[in-house]
Structures are given as structure tokens and as C-alpha cells.
Image: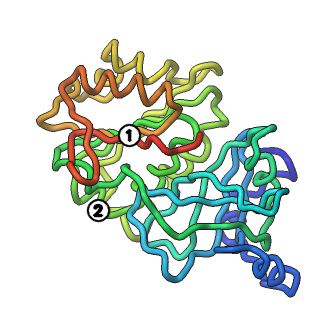
């Protein structure tokens, strides 16, 4: 995002803020407060930010929490946000859209390092490995900021221990909107924790729907006409071997669900694992 300027990746991931008296006052005034440590804007619609992690917070990669700010009425204004950082990270990362008239994002997009936000430390969600049956290959299907939970799962060693092949698809309207996911995937090979595990297992499949790019089209269309499988050199979806996680708009989630069910895959949950899961609570 261009508002306030663009922070380079290295700065965004390392910039820390000192807790001044002013910051301490902000924190004291907020329930479940955490401090913003870094912010990066990608386009005029997308940004990411990192905050301190509550010491008591334990979560499974792929889960979400409620975060927000205090509303004008003096009550917390909260929305569900997938945690983009892996479960072992000392901080929490989030990836967000900017909605000009959005009650929360119209204000959240202006946060700066040192500011305080509300974070309810009660993680939940269905995009977790426990909700999937064992399989050979896992697909992460994402549109827009729906990439966030997969940013967590892609950095979790458990993902590569459970599956022989990990395929992440990310569909956006414009090339710049792919930046967050593209940079994250590109950096995994050098990750000291999972770099060796990623080699030969991870496949990245980005597409755009408006701006011209090397690969264009809605992922639903590319599944229906089998282009996805031909490009990757893998067989069509098979419930005996394939698993999937889905996160995007309500329309996208619905369309992907129909395609997965048509291929014989069954939707799972924490209480009853299946061949695919969908995050219904994600806002973006």
C-alpha cells in the first residue's frame, strides 16, 4: 500500500518500537492490548503488520484470532484475522485488506509501530492439519488476503512432514497483489528451520484475473479445464491421495467446495477430519 510510503521487506520484518510512556498509556487503555512492531504496505488495498505475542497464547498454524481497535462508542471493534506467522514465531503477523469505508480496516490501515491494538488470545479455526485425514498431496487454495493462514502453514515443519507435495495457489486481480505470497514463498528455501524440507516438495501457482501475467485465470476455471494439473504435471483431484484447504471470498469458497465434492473429496472439521476444509470465518 502506498499510504504513508512503502517500507522495505527487511525493515518491515525487523523494525521494533520502544515502549514509551505514550505507548504504555495506550496499552493501559485497551483490553487485551498488544504493540505493533512493524507495518508494510504493498498496494493501496493490501498491507501486513506484526504485533507482540501474548505470553500465554498457544495456537495451531492456520488458526485465527479476533483483533481490532476501540470504536467511537467506547466498545471494542473486532474482526476475525488469520494468524499469518507460524505457531513457533515470537511475534504475530497479519495480512489485511483495506476497505475505505470498512468500520475496522479504514482505521487499522493507519497503524504505526508503537501503536496498540486489541488481540483476543483465543485462537480457533478449521484450516489446521488436525482437520485433514492423512494424504500424499495437499493443496492450499487462496484468493487475495485468504493467503494469510497459508503463510502460517507454509512456514510450519509439520506441513512438510505430513505431505509429500505441497501446492499453494494464489489468485489476485493484479500482479502487485501477489507480492506478499510471492516473497514469502521465495524466502522459504533459505529458511534455517524448514529450508531443506521445502526443497522438492513445495509448488507455487500464482494467477491473475485482470492484469496480464505469465499465468492468468480464476483457479476454479483452471481446475475445471484441468489446466492446473497439466501445468503442474500431477493427476486430477483424487480423494485417495489429495487433501485441500480453502480460504477466500464467500463466493470463491462455495465454488471450490463444489469442485472438491465433485471430485469425491469430503469436507472435514476438527471433530471429524476429512479430505478438505474451508475457513468460513475469514474476513477478506
- In the picture as drawn, the residue positioned furthest to the top comes out as 225
Q: Find numbered disc 1 in the image and state the secondary structure of the residue it sits on.
A: strand
- Drawn side of residue 220 relative to residue 32, left or right: left
Quadrant in which the C terminus is drawn: top right
Residue 87: image quadrant is bottom left
State the quadrant of the N terminus.
Answer: top right
Work out whether 3 lies above or below 190: above
- In the rendered image, is residue 154 in sight? no
Residue 152 falls in image quadrant: bottom left
* Residue 181, position as x, y percentages in the image: 54, 45
Name which residue lies at 24% across and 48% down.
132
- Percent position of residue 276, x then y: 28, 39
- Distance from label 1 to label 2 (Cα)? 19 Å
Mark 2 element type: helix
Q: Is residue 179 visible?
A: yes
- Taking the spot 65% from the left edge, 56% from the top edge, the residue there is 78
Residue corresponding to mark 1: 278
Q: Determine the image quadrant of residue 263.
A: top left
- Mark 1 or mark 2, earlier in chain: 2
Q: Which mark is residue 158?
A: 2
Residue at x-position 58% and y-position 62%: 93
* Left or right of 162 on screen, residue 217: right
> x, y percentage for residue 99?
74, 39
Using a 10 Å C-alpha cutoff, classify the residue at mark 2 as few (fewer than 14 neighbours), some (14 to 19) or many (20 or more).
some
Given contact means CB atoms under 8 Å apart, are the residues at marks 1 and 2 in contact? no
Amino acid at each position: 500500500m502506498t499510504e504513508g510510503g512503502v517500507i522495505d521487506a527487511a525493515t518491515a520484518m525487523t523494525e521494533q518500537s520502544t515502549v514509551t510512556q505514550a505507548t504504555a498509556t495506550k496499552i493501559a487503555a485497551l483490553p487485551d492490548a498488544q504493540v505493533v512492531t512493524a507495518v508494510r504496505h504493498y498496494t493501496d488495498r493490501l498491507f501486513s503488520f506484526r504485533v507482540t505475542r501474548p505470553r500465554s497464547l498457544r495456537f495451531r498454524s492456520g488458526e485465527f484470532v479476533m483483533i481490532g481497535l476501540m470504536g467511537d462508542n467506547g466498545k471494542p471493534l473486532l474482526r476475525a484475522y488469520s494468524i499469518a506467522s507460524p505457531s513457533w514465531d515470537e511475534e504475530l503477523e497479519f495480512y489485511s485488506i483495506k476497505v475505505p469505508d470498512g468500520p475496522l480496516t479504514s482505521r487499522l490501515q493507519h497503524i504505526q509501530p508503537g501503536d496498540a491494538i486489541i488481540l483476543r488470545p483465543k485462537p480457533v479455526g478449521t484450516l489446521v492439519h488436525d482437520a485433514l485425514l492423512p494424504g500424499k498431496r495437499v493443496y492450499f487454495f487462496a484468493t487475495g488476503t485468504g493467503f494469510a493462514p497459508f503463510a502460517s502453514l507454509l512456514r510450519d515443519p509439520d506441513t512438510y512432514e505430513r505431505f509429500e507435495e505441497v501446492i499453494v495457489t494464489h489468485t489476485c486481480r493484479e500482479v502487485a497483489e501477489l507480492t506478499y505470497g510471492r516473497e514469502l514463498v521465495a524466502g522459504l528455501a533459505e529458511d534455517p528451520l524448514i529450508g531443506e524440507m521445502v526443497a522438492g516438495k513445495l509448488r507455487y501457482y500464482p494467477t491473475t484475473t485482470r492484469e496480464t501475467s505469465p499465468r492468468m485465470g480464476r483457479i476454479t476455471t483452471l481446475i475445471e479445464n484441468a489446466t492446473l494439473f497439466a501445468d503442474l504435471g500431477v493427476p486430477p483431484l483424487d480423494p485417495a491421495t489429495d487433501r485441500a484447504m480453502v480460504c477466500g471470498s464467500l463466493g470463491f469458497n462455495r465454488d471450490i467446495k463444489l469442485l472438491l465434492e465433485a471430485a469425491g473429496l469430503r469436507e472435514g472439521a476438527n471433530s471429524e477430519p476429512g479430505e478438505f476444509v474451508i475457513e468460513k470465518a475469514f474476513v477478506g
